[in-house]
Amino acid sequence: MTAERLVVIGGDAAGMSAASQARRLKGPDELGIVAFERGNFTSYSACGIPYWVGGDVAERDHLVARTPEEHRARGIDLRMRTEVTEIDVAGQRVRVLDLGSGDSYWTGFDKLVIATGARPVRPALPGMDAPGVHGVQTLDDGQALLESLDRAPGGRRAVVVGAGYIGVEMAEAMLKHGFEVTVLNRGEQPMATLDPDMGRLVHDAMDGLGITTVNRSEVTAIRTGSYGRVRAVATGDASYPADVVVLGIGVEPETTLARAVGLPLGPHGGLLTDLSMRVVGHDNIWAGGDCVEVLDLVAGRTRHIALGTHANKHGQIIGSNVGGGYGTFPGVVGTAVSKVCDLEIARTGLREKDARAVGLRYVTATIESTGRAGYYPGARPMTVKMLAEYRTGRLLGVQIVGRDGAAKRVDIAAVALTAGMTVEQMTALDLGYAPPFSPVWDPVLVAARKAVTAVRRAGTA
């Protein structure tokens, strides 16, 4: 019997997790696995790049979970610096370009995994490709940025474009390198994944760290000097001197190949899959990672969320299904955490505008507490905002900004959202307590109690 052939496009989290799991379930005599990666690295943590650039992670290779050689030793034919340029769905083959030699060839598949990831948003503005302007999507990007920081002339001024997760993390990294940092943010407040009132807390903290944040600021051009290197970032009404520019505008699904052959895409441009991560309408094609859309369990709609946690889960599920096992991915609640210096930022579920967009009526509750008992040394403030559905009290979302272990408290809310709990049910949660770790009433439970009161008042209004 001839072995089936699995082709994987993409050698990072989703793609290589799928390949590795499939190999665990089926040996080379049953399933041949070929994976194509256009870059220089496999199975690495893109989320760790800001911390490597900032010096918290000492070496680039510490971000690599598994090298190409390790994958090959497990029976996976992994071909680096090799880009898939075309998919022939009917003919069950892909066209491949060897980026080193320039050779191009077709290779067939019985089963195909698309794990092409996401591409950074890079506006088509004058000067955007100038030396000194950097994205931070890959390890090669991070290396180029570090080298650029060493060569930066002038007064060591950095401009970060965008104030989302990558933007605030890179602002911290630039600060650690001794740069004067300006963040240009198109939105009302930093961290658009939070409501503006919570984003304001992030803004205030960044100001306190010496980071200048300019909100409602639309970049119009990158200005260059006599040698072509970046010298300033222009907005509609100002110009900000820059020796280095870091782009943190966000990412979008990389679905160029899929779009070209008419595979189904969602409203955010990501591939649509069923619960088994199989591409809708195609029995022998799977997709996972940053190139797909996932179901938001709270809103009931698909979303594009580029996170390594989801990508690795997708890969495990795909590999199980390809390898003869069984697995499903039910969806997400939208949990994410970040930090800028010692300020921790977390969110899960819906923001106010998300709830309005899907037609949900809601109440809010915001409280200030501490991460430890107030009398315990080192107790520091924490703000928790909670959204609950009008009348039913179903938890809809939680946002937390603070220090001293604030971020991981959002996991309590993530579990409650997944379970469909009400805020009243949350008040009875048996959470761990000791003065070094929490007040008697954990901040999340304090917010839940206040949300219960808001729900009751709304029900009698």
Image (spheres, rainbow, N blue to C red):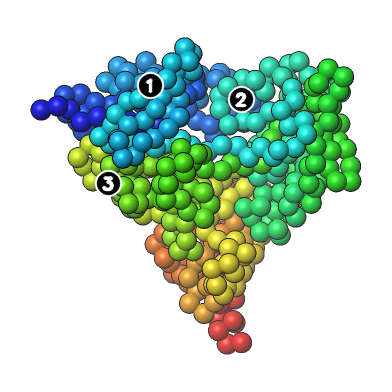
Q: Which residue is drawn at 39% across and 62% down?
A: 419
Disc 1 marks a residue whose amino acid type is: Tyr
Sequence-earlier tag: 3 or 1: 1
| Residue closer to the observer: 10 or 188 | 10
Whether tag 3 and tag 2 are in contact, CB under 8 A, the answer is: no
Task: Choose mark 1 or mark 2, whichever is in front.
Answer: 1
Disc 2 marks a residue whose amino acid type is: Asp
| Residue closer to the observer: 411 or 214 | 214
Q: Is residue 370 visible?
A: no
Q: Name the residue under label 3.
A: 283
Q: How crowded is mark 1: few (under 14 residues within 10 Å), some or many (20 or more)?
A: few
- Residue 95 in percent (x, y) is at 39, 27
Q: Mark 2 points at which residue?
A: 141
- Residue 377 in percent (x, y) is at 64, 45
Which residue is at the far top?
101
Task: Choose mark 3 or mark 2, whichever is in front.
Answer: 3
